[in-house]
Each structure stands twice: as structure tokens, then as C-alpha cells.
Amino acid sequence: MAGLPLRIEGLTVSGEGGRTLLEVPELSIEPGTAVVVRGPSGAGKSTFLYAVSGILPVTAGRILWGDQVLSEMNDPARAAFRRNQVGFVFQDHLLFEELSAFGNASIAALYAPKNRRAGIRSTGTEQLEKLGLSADEHRISGTYSGGERQRIAVARALAADPAIVLADEPTASLDRENADRLADDLMQLARDNGRTLIAVTHDPAMHAQADRVIDIVDGRIQDSAA
Amino acid sequence: MMAFWYDLPVAVQDGLVGLMLLTPAIVLGAVVLRGFETRPLLFALVRQQVWLSIVFVALIAVSVGIGVGLIAQERGLRQGTARAADKFDLIVAAPGSEITAMLAAVYLQASDMPLIDGETYHDIESHPRAELVAPIAFGDSWKDAPVVGTTPQFVVHLAESLTEGRMFASEEEAIAGARVPLSVGDEFSPAHGVGGAAEEDAHRGANYTITGKMPLTGTPWDRAILVPVEAVWGVHGLAVGHGPEWDGVVGPPFEPRYFPGTPAVLVRADSLGSTYGLQATFNNDETMAFFPGTILARLHALMGDVRQLMSVLAVITQVLVTASVLAGLMMLTKLLSRRLALLRALGAPGRFVFALTWSYAVFLIVIGAASGLTLGVLASWAISQAITARTDILVQATLDWPEIHIVAGFISLTSILALLPALLTMKRSVIAGLRG
Ligand SMILES: Nc1ncnc2c1ncn2[C@@H]1O[C@H](COP(=O)(O)OP(=O)(O)OP(=O)(O)O)[C@@H](O)[C@H]1O
Ligand SMILES: [Mg+2]
């Protein structure tokens, strides 16, 4: 699925106490570019991904994906947007430990329309295999290693063939070789398939490979085109 | 429409009522779960909270079990006592308490009762509509077994055929009930009175030999020893119901002049109408005549009132348990909120998360209710065994429609209530759940 351009205008996201967690005066991201976000711990990188995926409601400003105004959608519409357009790799994987690797990778099939289920299941299996995991139906994912779980989380994000891939530290628990391979694969999604990729990472190798690096410090975007 | 309903077989009616009671749950399930596959995640959630899930199921099972057990037990008791009175169409006794007379003559709970004399007995026996008339002369015992004097005809009426041996033919012979620890050929010596008041040596020298055994009847008569009524009179030093020229063959006819009396008489008429006629005839100043079945029906009506009170209590318990289970489910969904938030973060429709939470609750409720049904029947079975062992009245625990209906209603009601915790999960913020 071809990517969508992201446009942010005057965005503010506040936390519970009214504290400002994230401020983005203006930002545009084109599909087909591999974008990496970096910044110190607690800077607001995860908050940024939650905001642009619609998980976190915005306090002020606008988030547009193509011509869809995410910031003005209600909860169900934002969920539908995520379901149909976004693949999200969460920072600490967040798998259903009691489901198998396949069960996690193809979880979207449980609530997708009937005609999309088979596709999600086969793509999920494909992605697992591509990432070096077999779709063993009987082994629950709670028994997999940290790096393996991370790859299951990536397969889950890609199973529904999303236009937008948001990845929060996707290579954090992988060894160099696996990290590089996954980084290559993700960048390829953007460069060869024209999708929108935003990856939060501390990995200097990924920073070096990216088309564009965005720095976040203290909740503020400091864009620097690479 | 109503006529059509009443034309249906009762089992079909009961089945339809059960289905109707279950309909809300089924319809709700179909609507809530439509278009989703909740099963894999449902089992994942149950596995995640397996102990808590077991506790909930157990709570529901116990509360449903109490309700089911109560109903099954009451019915078993009612049927058992009625079956034990089956053979006793009409009892004639001296005026007094009908219940006392019934307990003594039908259930062998002996008590001192005035006797019916020979003339009266003769009047009953010679009534043209009376098919079977037999004295029931209780009062003696051997160990815990009541020794009852009667006629061979009564033994045949009660037992139909003996499982072993033959009918008593003389004053020294006796027939043992199925549960009496005596075999054919054994001898015993009766005591005067029963239980703690029995005088062991009062009938010294009187000896009976068992000549036959009755089949199991599921009544207190299984623990009784039946002897010729002549023998009971004899051991008490009374006339034996026959004149001096008696040939020694036990049983009727008895001569009024030599008839010392009997506390109760069983009468069986040649038709139902005649039974009512006989009852009217002998319910007079000198005797009372009553149908044990009627007395029992009155007692059962009384039990029915108690049952209703108990059912109300059982329903209150069930509602309370359900309420606490729902409160628990809300806590449980809080424990599961990270998983549910994750689903919503992934973009699962709110209705899917709602369906998942609801099916989780209903899964526990259905398993709990089904276990409760089993538990109730098992408990009722155990209690019935204990009652049968103590009273010899065969009480059978069975599963019948009323308790199935209650459980079906319970499932429907609670599956509606389970919408509540499911709704509450929708109110929680996704991000709060994710950051957990
Ligand atoms: N709901 C909230 N209310 C208040 N503060 C919050 C809330 N959620 C997050 N924060 C705070 O906002 C800041 C940014 O958090 P965020 O998770 O985006 O950081 P991050 O850049 O992803 O850090 P890390 O590299 O450690 O993952 C942190 O200081 C965090 O404690
Ligand atoms: Mg983070």
C-alpha cells in the first residue's frame, strides 16, 4: 500500500497534569523517505508516535495524513484509521504472551472484515518467516526471547500491509546482525514500496542510514534534514 | 394458539420454555459477537488470569448449586415419601391424629395408639366393596427392625413376590424386609416396644424363624419384619383371632370374639369410587378413615411453602453472588486493561474489545452455571443417599426441567448484567492502559 504524507501544524500534546509533553510547530514528512527520530530518554519520542497514530488525543493543532485530518477524528474513527493504515511496533513489544507467534502476528485477522482475514494471516506468516521465526502455532510467545519477541511485534505491525509504519525502538533488543537486517528491511519499505516510515531509535547505524533524522529534545522537534 | 401449546407434549413445552429463557443470552451473544473471532483472545485472557477465573467460576457454581440442589432435593423428598405411601390406599384407625396414624402405619414410626376391636374389624372386612383388609399390628421390634403383625395377603400386596423363600404359614414364622440383616432360616426373638423403650426379655421364649425375604421397596418396610398377626397376639398372651377349633393356618377370616385388636387397618377397595365410599363409611365416631396420599399432599403443600421461601433466599444469594462476581469482573478487566488498551492501540474496533470483555464474563458465567447444575445434582444425590440410609425411604436426586429453567434464566440475566463491565472497559483511556 502506498504511503501517506504527514503534515503537522501547531501541535501541542499535554499530559495529565496539564504539562506539555510535546510541541511541534510545523512538520511535514513525505512517503518514500526513511525517517528516524532520536532524542534523550523522556524527550517525548514515544509521545510523538502516539500522537501521530491517534492513540493520544491532541490538545491543540492539527495532524493531517494526506487529506485525512486525524486530529479532528473521534475515537472510533481514529481506531479505524490505525486499523486500516498504521502498523505500530511498540517500545516494549506488548505481545499477547498467551498467544503463539502466529496468533500475535495475525491478531488483526480477529477483528478485520472477513475478506481481509486470509490476507492478514498469510502476510503475518510471511513476515515471521522473513524475520527468521517459524509460525509455530503451539508455542506461546511468552516463551520467546526478547529479540524474538521484538521480531514478532514487527511482523504484527506489517501483517495488515499498512501505508504507515511507526516503530518505537524496533532494533533495541537485537544483536548487530539482526538489527542491521531489520533496519534494512524497514528502510526498504519506505524507499522501495513508497510507504511512510517513522522509526524512533537510539541506534547510530540506523541514524546513519536514514534519509532524514528528526531530533526531539524536551518535547520540542528540532528537525534536521540529513 | 394456547390450544396448540397445550396440545404439545409436556417435555416439548418444558424444552421450549428453557429455550425461551435462554433466548436473551443467545440473541445477545449473536449480536455482540457478530463479525468477530474472539475465541483465541478469550482463552488467552482466561489463561492469563487462570486462578481468578477459577475462583469466579467456583463462586457462581456454588450459588447456582444451592438453588438447584434445593429444588431437586425437595422434589426427590416429595416423590420418595409419596412412593412409600403408594400401597396404602386407605387406613382405618381409632380416632386421633391422622398424621400420627399415618407415620405409624405407613412409615413405621411406631407410637402408642388405641386399638380397633374385633367387631369393627369384622365390619370393615365384610364390607362388599373391600378387596383387601389387613391388620397392621406394630409395637414390637427386633434390634432396630419393627416387627409388624399382619396377614399373608398384606405381604403379597406389599411385596408382590418374595425374592427368596416362602410365605409364613405358622405363628413361628416370619418374612424379613430386604434390608433386615436376617436370612432365610435365621431365628430371632422379638422385644416388646421399639427403640430405647424396648423390653428385651418381655417376650422370652417367643421365637421366629425367617422363611422368606421381600424385595427392596424403597420404603421403611425394607427394615421391617412381618409376622402373622396371630403371633403378635400370642406373644402378648392374648387370644389369637381364631376360636378353639382353629386349624393353625394363619390369616383371615378372624373371629370377632377372639380378635384382641389392631392399631391400624389397611383397606383397599375394588375401585377408586369405592375407596371414597369406604372412607365415608368408616370415618365415624368409633373410627377414623383417611387417605395417606391426602395427608401427604397437605404436608407437601406445607413443604412447598417452605420451598418457596427457600427459593427466594436462593435467588437472593444468586443475585448477591452475581453482583460480587460482576464487581470482581470489573477488577479483572482492570487487570486486563493493558491487554485491552493494546488492542485498541492496534486499532481494534471498540465493539471488538467490548465483545471480548463480555464473552470473557459470559464464559465464566456459563461454565459456573453448568458446574453449579452438576454440583446441585451431586449434592442432592448425596443428601438423598443420607436420607435413604436413615429413613429407608428411597429418595432419588434427578435433574429436571425446573432447575434447568432456573439456570437458563440465570445465564440470561447475568449475561445482560455482564454488559456493564464490558461497557466500562470502553471508558478507560487507551494511553493510560498502554503505559500501564
Ligand atoms: N500521561 C502522562 N502524563 C504526564 N507525563 C507523561 C505521560 N506520559 C508520559 N509522560 C512523560 O512525558 C515524557 C515523554 O515520555 P515519552 O515516553 O514520550 O519519552 P521517550 O522519549 O519515548 O523516552 P524513552 O526513550 O525513555 O522511551 C516523559 O517525561 C514521561 O514521563
Ligand atoms: Mg519511548
Image (cartoon, coloured by chain):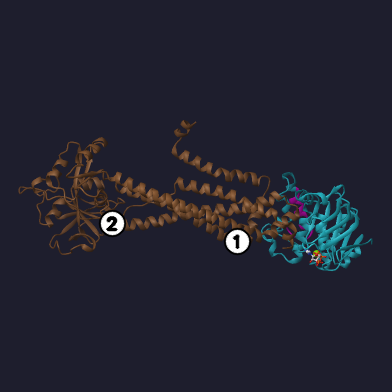
Q: Mark 2 lies on which chain?
A: B
For the magenta stretch, what is the residue range? A119-134
B162 part of magenta stretch: no
In this view of the protein, can residue A3 be seen by the observer? Answer: no
Q: For mark 1, what is the residue?
A: B50
Q: How many marks?
A: 2
Q: Where is residue A201 in the image (x, y as percent from the top left)?
A: 84, 64
SS of the residue at dot 2?
A: loop
Q: Mark 1 lies on which chain?
A: B
Q: For mark 2, what is the residue?
A: B179
First in residue order: circle 1 vs circle 2 = 1
Which amino acid type is marked by label 1?
Answer: Val
Q: Chain A is drawn in which colour?
A: cyan
- In the rendered structure, the answer to whether residue A204 lies left or right of residue B185 reads right
Q: Chain B is drawn in which colour?
A: brown
In this view of the protein, can residue B145 be seen by the observer? Answer: yes
Instruction: Compute the Cα span from label 1 to label 2.
Output: 48 Å
